[in-house]
Amino acid sequence: MSRLTHVVSGPYAPPVPARELTVVSADGARLHAEMHGPEGAPPVVLAHGWTCSTAFWAAQTRELAADHRVIAYDQRGHGRSPASPVCTTQALADDLEAVLAATLAPGEKAVVVGHSMGGMTVLAAAARPRFRAHTAAVLLCSTGSARLVAEARVVPIRAGRPRTWLTARILGSRAPLGPVTPVAKRILKYATMGAGSTPAMVEACARVVHACPRDVRHAWSRALEALDLSDGVRELTVPTEVVVGTADRLTPPVHARALVAALPYCVGSTELPGLGHMTPVEAPELVTGKIRDLVMTYAENTADAVGTGDTADVANTANTVDTADAPIKEGA
């Protein structure tokens, strides 16, 4: 599995989950998932981005778990989820559907939050019946639906073929990231975070990103390079809010504005001055607050509608296995 080297103290240290499980996706891929907070509380599902893991959501998980049931999972190949030879947006949609079925009761709806590739996961699943049956509202953070490489601003030259080519080579590199050194943190901060991000924020993000195996990082970069989920945007018919940092070099505001223009039911859009791509880490209180608002407005009563018992007893248990049975994948 990925080398879990997340920070172990401070606001970005992941809290201990109340329960862990392994969810089996449609093609047999096994996904690490964890649940925080009280059973019967309004559910929130968190889907992280490329090269990240459940640890990325530490600040949101800790705050929301006081009065929400927080469900976070590792995308295939990330965190504790073993790598898979299938790296497609359809596989991401299958995985999200499997997590929803395994952790929510029939008829229960959650607020689903996607950051970066997690947002693309939501767009890929938008037309799926199971996604629609289990989703009350969506928050999309720092994401896009198409032209990711062409619009990225990691390479500081004018837009065009040379910049697109260089960006693809950099983001798709197989080179190991190596240890988290001061130089590595400066590079990561430049590429993914705003100038005002604190050392603690940079350290937390660097440790999560550097834990991703290089083969997984490369495979998913190729999938994202060719991504076009424009149809998925139009299929996302639940209430959806969009957040982006104005200094985001990976998914700059042009993507958020295109989403807002195309979404059938956009309920809000926020551009955060000076913030980069890692908005849940760079603006944890704001992102958490928006999740809470979406729950209160669109999802607070869904748990009552299906009862307040243990959802593990009524979820699709055929798609889960005990975590102790899950195979361990060697790090890169």
Image (cartoon, rainbow, N blue to C red):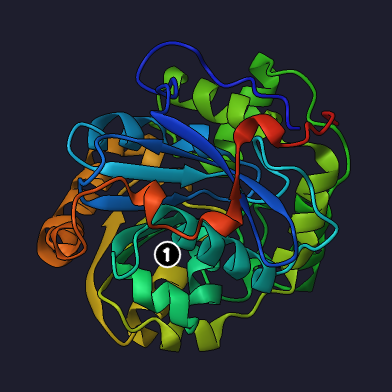
Which residue is found at the position 82% from the left and 39% from the top?
A: 214
Which residue is found at the position 84% from the left and 29% from the top?
A: 330
Looking at the image, residue 183 sits to the left or right of residue 58; the answer is right
Please say whether residue 243 is visible from this viewpoint.
Answer: no
**Whole-percent x, y for residue 246 in the image:** 38, 54
Quadrant (top left/top right/bottom left/bottom right) for the C terminus? top right
Above-or-below relation of 32 to 318: above
**Whole-percent x, y for residue 64 in the image:** 24, 37
Q: How many marks?
A: 1
**Which amino acid type corresponds to the residue marked 1 in the rendered image?**
Pro
Looking at the image, residue 37 sits to the left or right of residue 125; the answer is left
Which residue is found at the position 69% from the left and 29% from the top?
A: 211
Could you say which is closer to the camera, residue 310 or residue 159?
A: 310
Label 1: which secondary element: helix
Could you say which is closer to the camera, residue 121 or residue 94?
A: 94
Above-or-below relation of 7 to 59: above
Could you say which is closer to the camera, residue 120 or residue 29?
A: 29
**Whole-percent x, y for residue 207 in the image:** 61, 24
**What residue did someone put label 1 on?**
253
**Can you name the residue that lies furthest to the front here?**
313
Looking at the image, residue 89 sits to the left or right of residue 205; the answer is right
**Crowdedness near tag 1: few (<14), some (14–19) or many (≥20) residues, C-alpha within 10 Å:** many
Looking at the image, residue 102 sits to the left or right of residue 327; the answer is left
Res 266 → quadrant: bottom left
Above-or-below relation of 110 to 287: below
**Whole-percent x, y for residue 42 in the image:** 21, 51
Please say whether residue 2 is visible from this viewpoint.
Answer: yes
